[in-house]
Image (cartoon, grey):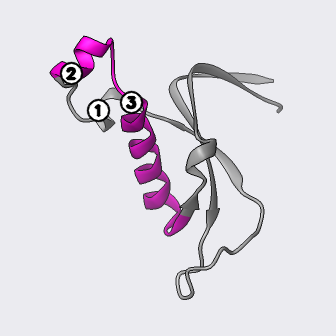
Amino acid sequence: MSKIKIEHAVKVPYVKLDKETGKPVVKMPVDAIVQITEDMLPPITGDERKLGGRLLTEYFKAAIAILEDEFGPIYIYQNSMEYLGTTTIVLKD
């Protein structure tokens, strides 16, 4: 078994959309876990510093942009998105 430690992980449920019709290709959403690095985020603002850190929406926007670049048109289930922080993924060999 392999373990992978991911920092600033975001879970994003999505379905792929047909390029021509814009309708979902499948009915069940797939969960993607995306790692967001600091260079993918805009500079931290003064308001965010006062609040103690970045807003989670910045991480969600970056994760959505990565998935759209990778898979093309997708529908995101925004109410089910989660910030996982530092997490470990265990892969069975």
User: Residue under circle 1?
Assistant: 39
Residue at 74% from the left image edge and 24% from the top image edge:
2
Amino acid type at circle 3 is: Thr
Q: Quadrant of the C terminus?
A: top right
- Is the residue 50 above or below the residue 3 in the image? above
The residue carrying pointer 1 sits among few (fewer than 14), some (14 to 19) or many (20 or more) residues within 10 Å by Cα, namely: few
Q: Which residues are magenta?
A: 46-74
Give the CA distance from mark 2 to mark 3.
Answer: 21 Å
- Is the residue 50 above or below the residue 82 in the image? above
> Is 29 situated left or right of 42 in this image?
right
The residue carrying pointer 3 sits among few (fewer than 14), some (14 to 19) or many (20 or more) residues within 10 Å by Cα, namely: few
Residue extending furthest toward the bottom: 20
**Is residue 83 or residue 32 the one in the foreground?**
83
- Mark 2 or mark 3: whose residue is earlier in sequence: 3
Residue at 46% from the left image edge and 50% from the top image edge:
64
> Is 12 situated left or right of 91 in this image?
left
User: Residue under circle 3?
Assistant: 37
